[in-house]
Image (cartoon, grey):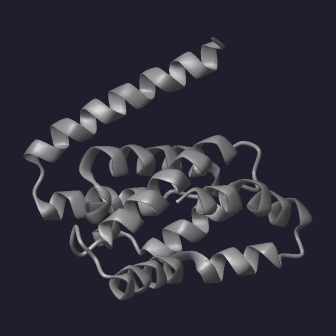
Amino acid sequence: DHPVRAIGQLIEKLFANFIEMMNSTFSQQEWKQQFDSFDKMGDKDLKKKLAAYNILVKKIGISWVTSYFNPKKLLSEVFQATGDQHTIGVAQLLLQSLLSNLYVSLKTSDKMTDEEEIGRFDKWRDLWIDSYIDLIKSKDFKLAKAVCEFVTPTILEI
């Protein structure tokens, strides 16, 4: 393993343990303050921000994350991050996690009718379709290509 990768994995484990500890002790207001600090991270910290979101989704669940962040805005950021060679790896992981967890979270019961399932799909699609189409039509060829190569297969898997 490359030393940078090993350090990244160590930091991810430490952050995950920290999140788990916070989850048992933080009030909802304290969580809100932590999420606000993530949301204010700039573009230079995008890779860290996306990695943090990925861990948060895994550790505390999609419903908590989407109660603090607009899912449409978050998905749009992740789609855009697929066009950057520095963030594409973490963006793909987060995208898979977000899309699949959001789809599951929209399930209303174990035995949904066809009509309910179609409604569920429509709600899920509405969270990402506008950003997806805008990025495919982007004048930035590298970004449009990355969205087609990395986002489209992820959407089709779910």
Percent position of residue 78, x then y: 59, 60
Q: Which residue does the image show at 38% across and 79% down from the upper left?
A: 117
Among the 4 quarters of the image, the one containing residue 65: bottom left
Q: Which residue does the image show at 34% across and 45% down from the upper left?
A: 58
**Residue 40 appears in view:** no
Nearer-the-camera pick, 56 or 110: 110
Nearer-the-camera pick, 19 or 155: 155
Q: Which residue does the image show at 62% across and 56% down from the upper left?
A: 154
Percent position of residue 124, x then y: 46, 76
Is 90 left or right of 150, judged from the image as shown?
left
Nearer-the-camera pick, 70 or 124: 124
Percent position of residue 143, x then y: 81, 62
Q: Which residue does the image show at 75% across and 74% down from the upper left?
A: 135
* Figure check: 70 above or below 56: below
Is 25 left or right of 77, judged from the image as shown?
left
Is 108 left or right of 139, judged from the image as shown?
left
Q: Quadrant of the N terminus?
A: top right
* Figure check: 63 above or below 118: above
Percent position of residue 133, x then y: 72, 79
Nearer-the-camera pick, 116 or 92: 116
